[in-house]
C-alpha cells in the first residue's frame, strides 16, 4: 500500500561547523554549498543549533540573549559583495585551524572587522528604510541587547548583578544617559544584528528554493548573565533583595549521583501568566521568523522542572515544580496557529509530559544509542522503545544528539559483549556500523530522521560536538573541512532516501 504522508530526512550541522577561511563557519559560501549538498543527498531538512551570541564556554545553549544573533557568524565575503568591506580588509586573515573553531582567536579577528562593516553600513545609509523597519519590528529586545553589550564591554564581565547600581537596576536616568552618550556604539550593535538578519534571510530563502526546511533550536532556559535576565528580571524567581535564588538542573540518577546543576534561572511562571506570556510570544515569534521547524530543548520542563536553591553546590536537594505548559502552548497557538515544534522529550519522562506533547501534536525524539542496553539476564533489550524496529510514526529518530558521541565513538566505547549485541542486532561488521545504523533509522516508521554530519562522515569521538557537564576549548568547536562531504557520501544518502521514500522523494 502506498503511504499518503510525508517522510523526512535531515542533516544536523551547526553554522559554526561549516567551512570558511575566517576560522568559524558563517553565512557565506559554505552555507550555500551545504544547502546544495543537502539537496544533492535527497534530504529535505537542515537542523542547526541555537543562533544566539555565545558567552563563556561558547555554548549555543547559554547565549547572551535569547533574541539576538551571534555576530561572529556574519560572513565577511557577503559584506564585501554588499560593499561594506573591501578585499583589502581581509587580505591578512590569520592562519586558523580548519577542523576546530578557535573562538577567542576568531573573536579577536572578526569583531573589529564586523564593527568596521557596521560603521560603513551606517555611513552609507543605502538600506536605511529596511534597517529602520527591522529595528521597529525587533524593538521588544534589540535596544536592551545593544545596551547590555555596551555595558558588558565596559566591565569586561556579563555578570550584570556585579555592575554599578544604576546600570544593574536599569534606572531610567542612567539608561537615558547611556542611550545619548553611547548612541554611536549602540548603533553599531544594531547594525550588526541587521546585517546578520539580512544574510540569514538570504540563506533561508535559498534553502526554501531547494525545498529544504530549516529546523531551529530553542533552549527552554536562559543564561543567568544574559540580556534576558537583566532586561526582564521580574520574569525569574528572585529573593526579597532581587537576587536570583532558584536555578535549574536534573536530579541524581545512575549516571550522575549528585545530579546536574545547570544553574540557569527558573521562571516565575505566575508573572508570565499575568502578561499572557508576552515574553514567550516574542521569543517564539522571533525564532519562527528564522526557521521553519522549532525544536524545543528540555521539553519536559514545560510540564514540571527541577528547581534547586541557588546556594546549593549540587542538584541533590532540588524539588520538582509544576509548570503551566498547557496554558503556555494554548496561548501560543492562539497567537500563531498550529505550531511546528519538535519536543526534546528525553530523560525522565512522565505520563503527564507525554500527555502534554501529544495534546499539541508535537513529535518526540528517539535516540538509538539509548536503546542498546541489557536486561537483567544480560541480553539485548529488544523491547526498548529507542530501538528502530519499535519506532512509531510521530517521532524524530537520531543516532545521537549534539550531546552524544558519534556513532563510531559510541560503538568504540562499548564493552565487547555490548558490541556483539549491537552488531548482531544490525547484522553488520564493525567496519559498516555507521551506515548500517543510518539505514536502520531510514527504514524505520519514524516520520523524521536526522543525522549529524559527523556520523555521515563516519568520524570518531574526536569529532563529537559536546560533552555535557564539561567546559573546555573542545566543546562546540568541531568543523568540517572543505570538500569532506564528498559526492560519494551524498549519493549514498540519496539512495537511502529513495529506497525509504524520504526527503525529496
Image: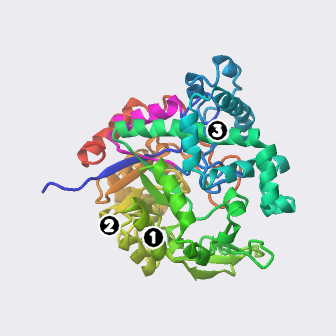
| The one of 446 and 73 positioned closer to us in this rendering | 73
Q: Which residue is mark 1?
A: 331
Which region of the structure is painted magenta? 28-48
> Which disc number belongs to residue 216?
none
Q: Secondary structure at mark 2?
A: helix
Residue at the image point whose x is 81% and y is 44% from the top: 181
* SS at mark 1 in the image: helix
Whether residue 408 is visible here, answered yes or no, is yes
User: Which is in the foreground here, disc 2 or disc 1?
Assistant: 1
Residue 324 position in % (x across, y down): 51, 77
Residue under label 2: 390
x and y, in percent, of residue 363 in the image: 38, 64
Rendering coords of residue 499 (x, y %): 24, 45
Disc 1: CA contacts within 10 A as few (<14), some (14-19) or many (>=20)? some
Q: Is residue 190 left or right of residue 174?
A: left
Q: Earlier in the sequence, mark 1 or mark 3?
A: 3
Q: Residue at left 70%, top 51%?
A: 55
**Residue underneath mark 3:** 192
State left or right for residue 431 relative to residue 482. Answer: left
Q: Secondary structure at mark 3?
A: helix
> How far apart are the two marked residues, 2 and 1, measured between alpha carbons?
34 Å
In front here: 118 or 59? 118
| Residue at image point 56% right, 71% down | 275
Cα gap from disc 1 to disc 3, whole angstroms: 32 Å
- Residue 403 is one of the magenta-drawn residues: no
Q: Residue at x 56, y 25 (%)?
A: 82
Name the quadrant of the N terminus.
Answer: bottom left
Amino acid at each position: 500500500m502506498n503511504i499518503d504522508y510525508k517522510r523526512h530526512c535531515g542533516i544536523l550541522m551547526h553554522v559554526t561547523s561549516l567551512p570558511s577561511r575566517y576560522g568559524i563557519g558563517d553565512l557565506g559560501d559554505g552555507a550555500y554549498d551545504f544547502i546544495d549538498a543537502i539537496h544533492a543527498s535527497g534530504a529535505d531538512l537542515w537542523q542547526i543549533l541555537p543562533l544566539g551570541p555565545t558567552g563563556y564556554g561558547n555554548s549555543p545553549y547559554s547565549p547572551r540573549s535569547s533574541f539576538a544573533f551571534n555576530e561572529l557568524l556574519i560572513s565577511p565575503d557577503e559584506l564585501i559583495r554588499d560593499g561594506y568591506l573591501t578585499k583589502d580588509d581581509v587580505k591578512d586573515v590569520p592562519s586558523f585551524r580548519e577542523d576546530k573553531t578557535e573562538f577567542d582567536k576568531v573573536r579577536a579577528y572578526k569583531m573589529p572587522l564586523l564593527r568596521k562593516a557596521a560603521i560603513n553600513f551606517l555611513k552609507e545609509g543605502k538600506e536605511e528604510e529596511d534597517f529602520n523597519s527591522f529595528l521597529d519590528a525587533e524593538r521588544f529586545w534589540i535596544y536592551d541587547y545593544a545596551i547590555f553589550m555596551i555595558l558588558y564591554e565596559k566591565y569586561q564581565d556579563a555578570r550584570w548583578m556585579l555592575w554599578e547600581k544604576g546600570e544593574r537596576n536599569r534606572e531610567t536616568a542612567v539608561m537615558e544617559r547611556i542611550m545619548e552618550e553611547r548612541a554611536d556604539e549602540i548603533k553599531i550593535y544594531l547594525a550588526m544584528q541587521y546585517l546578520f538578519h539580512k544574510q540569514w534571510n538570504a540563506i533561508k530563502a535559498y534553502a526554501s528554493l531547494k525545498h529544504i526546511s530549516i529546523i531551529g533550536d530553542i533552549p527552554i532556559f536562559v543564561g543567568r548573565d544574559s540580556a534576558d535576565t537583566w532586561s526582564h528580571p521580574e520574569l525569574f524567581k528572585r529573593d526579597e533583595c532581587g537576587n536570583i535564588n532558584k536555578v535549574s538542573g536534573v536530579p541524581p540518577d545512575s549516571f550522575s549521583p549528585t545530579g546536574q546543576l545547570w544553574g540557569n534561572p527558573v521562571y516565575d511562571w505566575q508573572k508570565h501568566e499575568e502578561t499572557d506570556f508576552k515574553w514567550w510570544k516574542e521569543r517564539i515569534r522571533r525564532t519562527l521568523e528564522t526557521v521553519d521547524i522549532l525544536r524545543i530543548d528540555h521539553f519536559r520542563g514545560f510540564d514540571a522542572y527541577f528547581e534547586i536553591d541557588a546556594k546549593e553546590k549540587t542538584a541533590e536537594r532540588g524539588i520538582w515544580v509544576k509548570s503551566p505548559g498547557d496554558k503556555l502552548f494554548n496561548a501560543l497557538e492562539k497567537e500563531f496557529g498550529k505550531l511546528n515544534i519538535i519536543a526534546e522529550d528525553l530523560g525522565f519522562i512522565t505520563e503527564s509530559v507525554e500527555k502534554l506533547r501529544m495534546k499539541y501534536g508535537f513529535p518526540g525524539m528517539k535516540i538509538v544509542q539509548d536503546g542498546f542496553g541489557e536486561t537483567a539476564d544480560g541480553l539485548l533489550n529488544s523491547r526498548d522503545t529507542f530501538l528502530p524496529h519499535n519506532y512509531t510514526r510521530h517521532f524524530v529518530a537520531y543516532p545521537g544528539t549534539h550531546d552524544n558521541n558519534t556513532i563510531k565513538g559510541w560503538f568504540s566505547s562499548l564493552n565487547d559483549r555490548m558490541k556483539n549485541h549491537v552488531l548482531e542486532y544490525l547484522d553488520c561488521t564493525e567496519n559498516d556500523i555507521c551506515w548500517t545504523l543510518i539505514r536502520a533509522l531510514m527504514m524505520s516508521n519514524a516520520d523524521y530522521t536526522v543525522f549529524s554530519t559527523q556520523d555521515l562522515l563516519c568520524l570518531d569521538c574526536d569529532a563529537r560536538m559536546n560533552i555535557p557537564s564539561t567546559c573546555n576549548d573542545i566543546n562546540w568547536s568541531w568543523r568540517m573541512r572543505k570538500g569532506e562531504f564528498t559526492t560519494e557520501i551524498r549519493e549514498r544518502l540519496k539512495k537511502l532516501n529513495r529506497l525509504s521514500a524520504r526527503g525529496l522523494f
